[in-house]
Image (cartoon, rainbow, N blue to C red):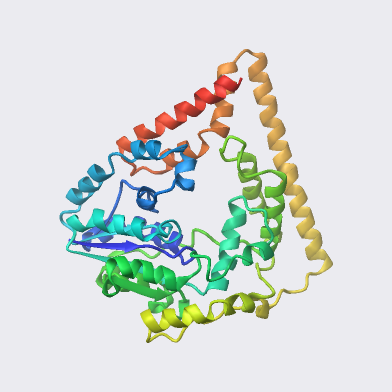
Amino acid sequence: MRCVIHIGTEKTGTSLLQEWLYANFKGLCKSGIWLTERFGTPNNRHFPAYFRVQPDDFALQYMLNSPEEKEAFLRSFRDDFEAEIAKAKSCHTILITSEHFHSRLTDTAEVAALRAFLDPYFDSIEIVCYFREQSDMALSSYSTHVKGGGDEDIDSVMANVAPYNPYYNFLSIADLWSGVFGKENCRFRIYDRARFISRDIRRDFLEAIGAQTAASELSFDIENKNPALSGVQAIVFRQINRAIPYFNEDGGINRQNVRLKATCLEYSALAAGTIFFPSQDEVAARFNESNHIFFETYLPNERGFTYNFREKIGQPEMTEAEISDIVASVSQCFLKEIKQLNAQERTVNAQERAGSSRVSMFARWRQVADYKIHKWLSETPLVSRKIRKRFRGPAERRRRQLRSKR
């Protein structure tokens, strides 16, 4: 049996690819390709979390604050994996996909541990990775950054886009994965629609994993699941993050922040402009030397990156009416949120006056402590029962902590 690991990189259409792959679970299985069901879907996030030495945002999100808690949470990892292989016995390939391999496994020992774990089960292991020009990748990452609570301006973020940052150094990423799995087993490709098979990353990905014939069994209806913010939306989101932090003091997600951003996306007037950086070409130039070696070593037949400098596209001048629409939309957005919060406060107060402290406490706990946990459990039908049971422990601990504070 063969294993294919899709490691990203981030901001190369991974959300679309993963949603599309799992939407076509049956068609891929019919073509001999098995998608894992027990390690997070559609992003197999548990794999990089398991092999990363230091706890990352995945561990903190589920209140796994020590190596011991993390180990207890993932104790059945090998058993679950062997169960997956048993279910996939009619397939010739197991596909593992997570862009967090790129961003979280940055140490040779971690990647080597991944290979040591997989080697006994497979005849061959292949790595698939897409690379996007760094300055354009950074602009796309900035959109995700403010969606997730970042409040820094784009100048501060772009200052760290340099070869010393392993997130953007493609040469070091290629050296790391090829050094562990072998250069001959690495399928490195450029993220560029003009170079994709049929200008479609999904069809290009099938070609990368040697599964072109599977296309006839698959649906291509899935659309982009993670669209970038507009220039105005990014500004509004950044101000929301400054006024209403994305995380509560106890580490839980602030639902008011999430709701407010979702409301902003309802107003078309805020979808104006694009995120851009005036000195994007200077950022791109920082990687000239390392990118030259990267292409020469790993993609000698490619012509290098096609640069997409957004400042050259320009930002259209806005009319007074368009600016007025933007201001009105932001105002309506905040007024809608205030109205909703007032209604919730009246409900909680009524419950407390009626003596329903238990209901009130549970409502607050749901808003603060278990938002991510219950959302993940309810929206991931393929998660195993073992994993579900393990989530209850951290949730109960958080509930007791909140009760003790009261």
Depth order, front residue of 260/54: 54
In the image, residue 31 sits, relative to residue 195, either above or below, namely above
Viewer can see residue 299: no
**Rendered location of residue 17, percent (x, y):** 40, 62
Most extreme residue toward the top is 355
Side (left or right) of 3 relative to 24: left
Depth order, front residue of 243/92: 243
In the image, residue 79 sits, relative to residue 167, either above or below, namely above
Q: Please tell me which residue is depicted at 67% across the width and 71% down the height of the picture.
A: 277
Quadrant that contains the N terminus: bottom left
**Rendered location of residue 157, percent (x, y):** 63, 62
Side (left or right) of 406 relative to 342: left
**Rendered location of residue 59, percent (x, y):** 45, 43
Depth order, front residue of 320/59: 59
Q: Please tell me which residue is depicted at 42% across the width and 78% down the height of the picture.
A: 294
Most extreme residue toward the right is 320
In the image, residue 109 sits, relative to residue 250, either above or below, namely below
Q: Please tell me which residue is depicted at 37% across the width and 71% down the height of the picture.
A: 175
**Rendered location of residue 10, percent (x, y):** 47, 63
Q: Quadrant of residue 75?
A: top left
Quadrant that contains the C terminus: top right
Number of callouts in the render? 0
Viewer can see residue 155: yes
Q: Please tell me which residue is depicted at 33% across the width and 73% down the height of the picture.
A: 187
